[in-house]
Amino acid sequence: MRQKRWLCLLLLPLLALLGARETAMPALAPQPAGYIALTFDDSPNGSVTERLLDGLRERGAHATFFIIGQQIEGQEALLRRMEAEGHQIGNHTFTHRRIDTTGAVGLHELERTEELLCATLGGSGYWVRPPWGFASAETLRETNVPLIHWSLDTEDWSVLDADRVAACVLNGVCDGDIVLLHDSYETSVDAALRVVDELSAHGYVFVTVEELFERMGVTPETGRLYSRPDALRPVK
Ligand SMILES: [Zn+2]
């Protein structure tokens, strides 16, 4: 009898402690396996972009859209939807012109699109993706926002095959990568949504480029060309 009581006296505090631990320490959410920024150039593109936005919304994924200024007219609602659904919007010149070799003309294209984005969405300082990724030291000096290259090029515009584009990302992507795609092609939308499904199941989270910088603890600087938040693209 006495022995039993001793046992109770020993066990009770232990059980109380375990119980308390359970209530005081809820299960921790699993750490993401990594963060990935999908970027879509030459945007917006009507129903193709719309289908992509539907798919991203269903999956709780965010992306970044680099806008060609001359495509904004008539698609303002699509831009507002992108913003309302948490995507980042960037500047891809007015007519998809090279900005590294065209001097003031290229810079003017950036200004024109910046003005249109401001008029459509408010805000300012839209980050730039140079067409074809080409930038010069002069462009960087004259641009007062961060410029975003990429670290994984799917070449989706030439491949035009959802399986191959998806495989390119699934086989090559790393935590912190910026992936280049175009929302001009149904095959790219199919590939992107497949990539989100597959990698989300493995714990990856899809964020905007801006959020990728935050998650990696990097402060973006103006006039620099980034291929990832932690890697600059050399410029001549
Ligand atoms: Zn482009």
Image (spheres, rainbow, N blue to C red):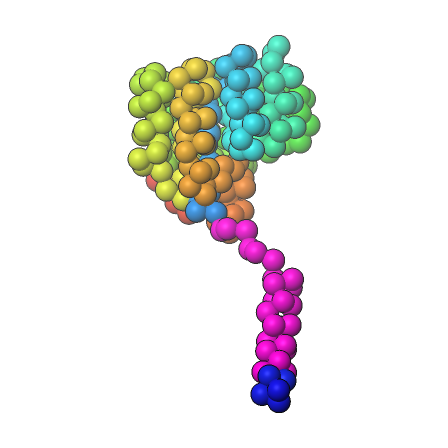
102 on left or right of 78: left
Looking at the rendered image, the quarter that the N terminus falls into is: bottom right
Which percent across, then down, holds residue 39?
46, 29
Tell me which segment is drawn in magenta.
6-31
Q: Quadrant of residue 188?
A: top left
180 on left or right of 17: left
Which residue appears at 35% of the width and 34% of the height?
170
Which residue appears at 65% of the width and 22% of the height?
80
Viewer-side residue, 85 vs 73: 85
**Vertical relation: 8 (above or below) 102:** below
Looking at the rendered image, the quarter that the C terminus falls into is: top left
Which residue appears at 55% of the width and 17% of the height?
50
- Assess whether residue 148 is covered by the magenta stretch: no
Q: Would residue 115 be visible to someone looking at this image?
A: no
Which percent across, then down, holds residue 198?
41, 33
- Assess whether residue 24 is covered by the magenta stretch: yes
**Vertical relation: 86 (above or below) 186:** below
**Vertical relation: 156 (above or below) 13:** above
Q: Quadrant of residue 130?
A: top left
